[in-house]
């Protein structure tokens, strides 16, 4: 038999959640076939079998968080699934048996093939079997695990059991008085608040970005860029591309290409800080932030400086689509050297983004707005786009960041150079 273990599905993954099982005990499994879906710190990803066989045991039920390397199922030839039975009960002590044991009826043939763990709550003095998630929810809601009937595999207590117990006895489930558990938290009735568990993606995003702000001394540089000609150029370019059955190009696609070109001219921004040394990246791999349900992922356009705007447009759409479906592959989210976050489509004019470690910089892009400018002594309306560079001051100096933004601005204001 072979253990199926929680795999490392991303470079930052420390644990994963079994989102759901595609196979059940007794099902045949072919090599490369999807057996489960795993929620990682970056996306919902498919777990494929490495060997042929029969799924003999499921060790971790859906909804449970486990560390990488933990066995979650057993794959074998099928004999284990058919032969699995409850182990014989241990011999009673010399003293008289406990009341529950004395009153228990003889095991029926059906009971002999049941899972090893009993479905009833654990006996007094023993520790109830519960998933890590169930234990955490029980602690949060003040539910005694010993009073809960488990409905998971083998009587294991799962999150749904805890929530049902808390709903059935809200007074008992409420923790003892904790008047100042969270200073500044609003005092509201429980009916006015809905608790929403954090997805694994959001948990890790919160952890990494908090560490980024704490460890990397950010500084910010903002440029106001006249993109009037850029927008006209994009419209003309798309007319030609559509006439040739080519893909449409977005403003963001032109920005990605301009960033890649500017990094090639200013390689000192395409770096990472690594303690006692700097890492100068030879490839320009641009992460483009994509908002998804439950968090944020950053698929990476590899070697963006070597690709045309239409290639970037096609690849960006494919990556964003797979990101929203939770089907990004590990290599499509790894290896970024610089990131771009664009909130212009939401009408945001200007903002500052948090650096995505281990990168040293990220560019925040706002929306283009009509503004009055003075040109040749006359007032004219122009489209102005504001961008803000967030940089790690340990790796990037202010003048270096300014030179990068100057190059980037010149490209957007003379857009033919972006595709030249």
Image (spheres, rainbow, N blue to C red):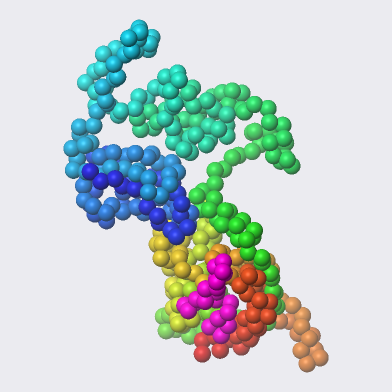
Q: Nearer the viewer, residue 71 or 108?
A: 71
Q: Is residue 273 above or below residue 98?
A: below
| Residue situated furthest bottom in the rendering | 376
> Looking at the picture, does residue 330 appear above or below residue 127?
below
Total residue callouts: 0
* Residue located 53% across and 79% down the image: 260
Q: Quadrant of the N terminus?
A: top left
Q: Is residue 206 within the magenta segment?
A: no
Is residue 62 in view from this perspective? yes
Q: Which residues are magenta?
A: 264-284
Q: In the picture provided, is 85 more to the left or to the right than 221?
A: left
Is 222 situated left or right of 330 in this image?
Answer: right
Q: Quadrant of residue 227?
A: bottom right
Q: Which residue is at the far top?
A: 96
The structure residue drawn at horizontal position 69% and vertical position 70%, both measured from the top left corner, is 220
Q: Position of residue 358 (x, y in %)?
A: 54, 66
Query: As rendered, which of 395 and 177 lies closer to the eye?
Result: 395
Residue 345 appears in the picture as rendered: no
Q: Residue at x 56, y 66 (%)?
A: 275
Above or below, 178 relative to 54: above
The furthest residue to the right: 377
Left or right of 7 on screen, residue 238: right
| Residue at point 78%, 86% (across, down) | 374
Q: What is the x, y in percent for residue 389?
A: 64, 72
In the image, residue 256 lies at what x, y percent?
Answer: 54, 76
Looking at the picture, how far across and down is residue 68, in whole percent? 41, 49
Going by the image, does 312 lie left or right of 107?
right
């Amino acid at each position: 038999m072979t253990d199926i273990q929680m795999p490392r599905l991303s470079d930052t993954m420390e644990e994963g959640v079994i989102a759901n099982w595609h196979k059940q005990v007794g099902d045949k499994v072919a090599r490369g076939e999807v057996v489960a879906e795993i929620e990682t710190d970056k996306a919902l990803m498919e777990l494929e079998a490495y060997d042929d066989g029969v799924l003999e045991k499921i060790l971790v039920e859906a909804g449970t968080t486990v560390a990488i390397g933990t066995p979650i199922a057993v794959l074998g030839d099928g004999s284990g699934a058919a032969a699995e039975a409850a182990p014989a009960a241990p011999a009673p002590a010399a003293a008289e048996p406990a009341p529950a044991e004395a009153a228990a009826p003889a095991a029926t043939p059906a009971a002999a093939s049941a899972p090893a763990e009993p479905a009833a709550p654990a006996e007094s003095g023993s520790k109830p079997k519960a998933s890590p998630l169930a234990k955490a929810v029980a602690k949060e809601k003040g539910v005694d695990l010993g009073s809960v009937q488990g409905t998971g595999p083998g009587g294991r207590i799962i999150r749904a059991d805890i929530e049902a117990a808390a709903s059935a006895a809200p007074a008992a489930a409420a923790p003892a008085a904790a008047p100042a558990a969270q200073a500044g938290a609003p005092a509201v009735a429980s009916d006015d608040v809905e608790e929403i568990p954090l997805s694994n993606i959001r948990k890790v995003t919160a952890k990494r970005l908090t560490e980024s702000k704490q460890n990397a001394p950010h500084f910010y540089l903002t440029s106001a860029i006249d993109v009037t000609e850029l927008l006209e150029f994009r419209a003309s370019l798309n007319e030609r591309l559509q006439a040739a059955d080519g893909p449409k190009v977005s403003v963001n696609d032109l920005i990605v290409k301009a960033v890649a070109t500017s990094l090639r001219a200013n390689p000192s921004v395409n770096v990472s800080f690594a303690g006692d040394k700097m890492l100068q990246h030879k490839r320009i791999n641009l992460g483009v932030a994509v908002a998804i349900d439950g968090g944020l992922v950053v698929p990476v356009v590899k070697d963006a400086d070597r690709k045309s705007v239409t290639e970037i447009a096609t690849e960006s759409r494919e990556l964003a689509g797979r990101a929203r479906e939770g089907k990004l592959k590990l290599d499509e989210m790894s290896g970024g050297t610089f990131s771009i976050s664009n909130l212009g489509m939401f009408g945001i004019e200007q903002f500052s983004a948090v650096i995505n470690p281990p990168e040293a910089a990220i560019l925040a892009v706002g929306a283009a707005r009509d503004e009055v400018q003075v040109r040749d002594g006359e007032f004219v309306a122009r489209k102005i786009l504001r961008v803000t560079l967030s940089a790690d001051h340990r790796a990037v100096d202010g003048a270096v960041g300014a030179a990068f933004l100057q190059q980037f601005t010149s490209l957007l204001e003379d857009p033919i150079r972006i595709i030249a």
